[in-house]
Image (cartoon, rainbow, N blue to C red):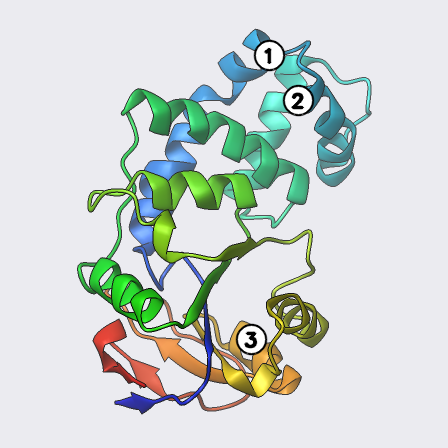
Amino acid sequence: MIFFAGRGILLDVEGTTSSISFVYDVLFAFAREHVADFLTRHSGAPAVLSLLPALAADAGIPPTSDGVQLALAAIDLMNRDVKSTPLKALQGMIWREGFESGELVAHTFDDVPEALELWASSGLDVRIYSSGSVQAQKLFFGHTAHGDLTEHLRGYYDTTTGPKRDPVSYEKIAADMGLEPRQILFVSDIGEELDAARQAGMATALAERPGNRPAGGLFEHEALQSFADIVF
């Protein structure tokens, strides 16, 4: 059990609220399969055009690269799991089509919906911090196998706030939540992320979910197998 007397809970997604296999084997696979067609169909859309120069820069290709080269570059970044902000934005746009068509339905562990509802109804400020774009996070929690869970969430953060392994990112999030870092519990499956949150002053908990990799990191973080392990 983890006893928490604070006022806010900040959650990672992959390996924490949802399985790693769903993210890699379903979401990433969907984006890889559809990226070339998406770029062709939306080549003139301002939202797409605005992120392509940064995507090309992250991939190390010329900004004048054509759609095929950009699609291949995006796939390469995905295969290498590069935390590229423009790539995450592009993935979010592709996933939007999948979620809205019903082709994609987000996975969450069975304990997640009940915990989110309990925390929110008890007055806790529950938010998400993921390397996936804010748009993708909203789509994810709005289209789960358990229904729309966004009513339980007050905010979302992605890499535009800062890297997840940088303590400054967690200081920014605490300030945005209007809470002292010590009043926030951050839950993740990645040790280096938890280390950064701990250095910023947050309470931390390590998510040990089926299929998760070794957490790594420098510090020890109290572990949980279910959100029901959090007592407040």
Q: Are marks 3 and 1 in contact (CB under 8 Å)?
A: no
Q: Quick one: SS at disc 1?
A: loop
| Residue 145 position (above or below residue 33) | below
User: CA gap, disc 2 to disc 3?
Assistant: 32 Å
- Identify the disc placed on residue 48: 2
Residue 44 seen in this snapshot:
yes
Q: Are marks 1 and 2 in contact (CB under 8 Å)?
A: yes
- Please tell me in which quadrant of the rendered image residue 145 appears: top left
Residue at 58% x, 9% y: name it. 40
Amino acid residing under circle 1: His
**Which quadrant is the N terminus positioned in?**
bottom left
Kindly identify which residue carries mark 3: 192
**Within 10 Å of the Cα at label 1, are there few (<14), some (14-19), or many (20+) other Cα atoms?**
few
- Secondary structure beneath dot 3 equals helix
Q: Residue at x 50, y 12 (%)?
A: 37
| SS label for mark 2 | helix
The residue where tag 1 is placed is 42
Q: CA distance from mark 1 to mark 2?
A: 7 Å
Name the kind of residue labelled 2 in the image. Answer: Val
Instruction: Indicate which disc, 2 or 3, sits on the residue closer to the N terminus.
Output: 2
**The one of 209 and 72 positioned closer to us in this rendering:** 209
The residue carrying pointer 2 sits among few (fewer than 14), some (14 to 19) or many (20 or more) residues within 10 Å by Cα, namely: some
Question: Does the rendering let one see residue 11?
Answer: no
Left/right of residue 128 with respect to residue 70 in the rendered view: left
